DNA sequence: TCCATTAGCGAACTTAGTGTTCGGTATATA
DNA sequence: TATATACCGAACACTAAGTTCGCTAATGGA
């Protein structure tokens, strides 16, 4: 990748993340992004089709390593529902949010975050789907699989939302415990 | 209320609901609404501050009777968690959605529905909050009340979303059963 | 029935944001 | 060094939101 391209891309991501620490995704305009990033309007659109794609690509950069490493755990036969596992994906995600690198939590907490939530949730759905054969409980056997999977992913996302909205006072370990008590 | 005002208001609601049966809330413009309703632009803004307020007022008209009657049930000491009660609020809500008067389900299913979901969820939160003293289980005693309440409301909303997205094949009774199995 | 009030009309207008185009300049890579 | 291309910047078309105002007509009370 051309060094100029890389620099521009990083400048845009940087400006975007900075703006996310100040306001909601929906309130941020392309004009603001390019002003902070100090790039031309045409340049922005050369890199990202729309503002929504920018968000999507940012998400991927921030979270793909977690989801990827989680997928790899599959092969090790240690699954994501093991709440005591120190490398539980869910715990890992809560910790990552707590660190709040790049103001990730802003993305989830405020209204108008559907796009990000969708990205997050669809990744979770995929992950859980792959794991579901490993998981059978009295509950899951009584319910349609798609309902059950959707329920777990939704509950995770809503737990995160609750946690952030309440100031993230609890430790990642505690909130992971809450999560596992209700699913 | 002036007859002219009433007519205009109804024309706007009608056009809005009609448009909701064709596309998402976010895709509908004020221009389209006033064209269908056959009212002037200024008239629209005389009635509704913004498109968001229009949605809010529509929601209130569609659902306030359910939430109001649910609140009244409190005094009768029969509470919303009684899944066998034929007048369970949750069952009532599922039935109302199934009837789909005024294309309500469109409001919940598609993306870009945060506003409506928020309205819906905040009403549920209020309702559950009032009921929560009546409800104590092994689960709820272990968890912070706000987490627990939020979990129930979220799960309901997400169950509705799942149901609609999957074509509402199940009966309201069945889906109420699913809901009660996971909370 | 009359009349003051007020809802609605419609058309023009401001503001704001999105996304595109294009010729010129600077920088990277081979 | 030469060619390709990323970037600039400024203008442009377009869409939608929300406002303004003078005029008309319906309404509801006396």
Image (spheres, coloured by chain):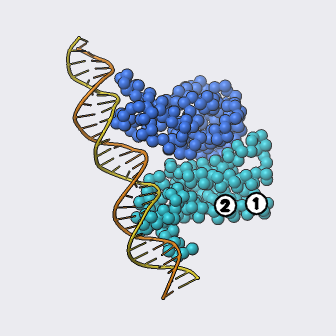
Chain colours: A cyan, B blue, C yellow, D orange
Please give the count of numbered marks on the rendered protein: 2
**Residue highlighted by disc 2:** A67
- Residue wearing tag 1: A74
The N terminus of chain B: image quadrant: top left
Q: Residue at 74% across / 45% down in the picture?
A: A145
Q: Where is residue B183 in the image (x, y as percent from the top left)?
A: 67, 40
Q: Which chain carries label 1?
A: A
For image coordinates 72% across by 61% down, the residue present is A71
Looking at the picture, tell me which residue is in the foreground, B35 or D28. B35
Q: In this view, does A180 lie to the left or right of C14?
A: right
Position of B71 with respect to A149 (left or right) is left
Counting from the top left corner in percent of width and height, residue B137 is at 68, 39
Q: Which SS class for mark 2? A: helix
Relative to residue A176, is residue D27 drawn left or right? Answer: left
Q: Residue B155 carries which label?
A: none
Q: Determine contact: label 1, label 2, CB under 8 Å.
A: no
Q: Nearer the viewer, residue B160 or A77?
A: B160
Image coords of residue B32 (percent x, y)? 45, 38
Q: Which residue is rendered at x = 56% and y = 52% of the image?
A: A115
Labels 1 and 2 within one chain: yes
Say whether residue B77 is visible: yes
Q: Distance between the residues labelled 1 and 2?
A: 11 Å
């Amino acid at each position: 990748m051309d060094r100029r391209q890389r620099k521009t891309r990083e400048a845009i991501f940087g400006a975007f993340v900075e703006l996310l620490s100040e306001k909601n995704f929906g309130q941020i305009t392309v004009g603001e992004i390019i002003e902070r990033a100090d790039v031309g309007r045409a340049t922005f659109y050369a890199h990202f089709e729309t503002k929504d794609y920018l968000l999507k690509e940012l998400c991927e950069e921030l979270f793909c390593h977690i989801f990827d490493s989680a997928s790899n755990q599959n092969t090790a036969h240690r699954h994501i529902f093991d709440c005591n596992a120190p490398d539980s994906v869910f715990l890992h995600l809560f910790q990552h949010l707590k660190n709040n690198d790049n103001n990730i939590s802003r993305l989830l907490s405020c209204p108008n975050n559907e796009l990000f939530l969708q990205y997050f949730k669809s990744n979770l759905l995929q992950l859980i789907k792959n794991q579901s054969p490993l998981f059978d409980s009295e509950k899951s056997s009584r319910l349609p699989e798609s309902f059950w999977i959707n329920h777990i992913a939704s509950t995770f996302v809503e737990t995160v939302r609750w946690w952030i909205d309440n100031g993230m006072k609890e430790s990642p370990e505690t909130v992971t415990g809450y999560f596992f008590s209700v699913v």
